[in-house]
Image (tube, rainbow, N blue to C red):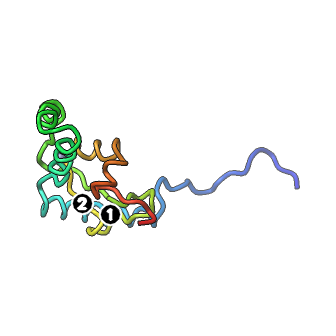
Amino acid sequence: MKRSGPLKRSTSLRSVSKKRQQVSGKRRAMVREQLEARPKCEAGEPIYMHYVNKFGKAFARERSRTDRCQGRATDIHEPLMRSRGGSIVDPENTIAVCRRCHSWIHANPEASVAMGLLRHSWD
Ligand SMILES: [Zn+2]
């Protein structure tokens, strides 16, 4: 076969598949609903207690001066992450968290698993 130049598409590629587009819409609605129903960060207290148990109350108090839970939930976290096969549209797989606690959870996966804030795919 004789060709002049590379194959050309007649239509442009979608930036997001139709399937993913549908899931994203459902996800947005679920996040809005959950944050409305659960306005408080649900990870601040367990994370604080993690530091109390590990390093004592004085350390935990000192630490929370610089890295305090922001109180108001702004993110919806999935204990069973999407990368581990978790649903991102199931409210049962959510924890309402503030941005700071959300970052902490992903920065401290081992402790978060022990605290039930993260789950392994095989659990
Ligand atoms: Zn928090």
Q: How far is the residue under mark 1 from the one under mark 2?
A: 10 Å
Locate the N terminus and report the quarter of the image it occupies: bottom right
When asked about the image quadrant of residue 29, the answer is bottom left
Q: Which residue is mark 2?
A: 31
Q: Position of residue 117 (x, y in %)?
A: 28, 55
Which one is in front, 23 or 105? 105
Checking the image for residue 59, the label placed there is none
Relative placement, left or right, of 60 versus 120 is left
Identity of the residue drawn at 31% across and 69% down: 90
* Secondary element at image label 1: helix
- In this rendering, the answer to whether 63 lies above or below 17 is above
- Upstream in the sequence, badge 1 or badge 2? 1
* Secondary element at image label 2: helix
Query: Local crowd at mark 1 within 10 Å, few (<14), some, or many (≥20)?
Result: few
Which one is in front, 80 or 7? 80
- In this rendering, the answer to whether 115 lies above or below 85 is above
Identity of the residue drawn at 83% across and 50% down: 3
Which one is in front, 23 or 76? 76
When asked about the image quadrant of residue 93, the answer is bottom left
Q: Which residue is mark 1?
A: 25
Which one is in front, 45 or 57? 57
Identity of the residue drawn at 25% across and 56% down: 76
Residue type highlighted by circle 1: Gly
Query: Local crowd at mark 2 within 10 Å, few (<14), some, or many (≥20)?
Result: many
- In this rendering, the answer to whether 3 lies above or below 91 is above
Identity of the residue drawn at 25% across and 65% down: 30
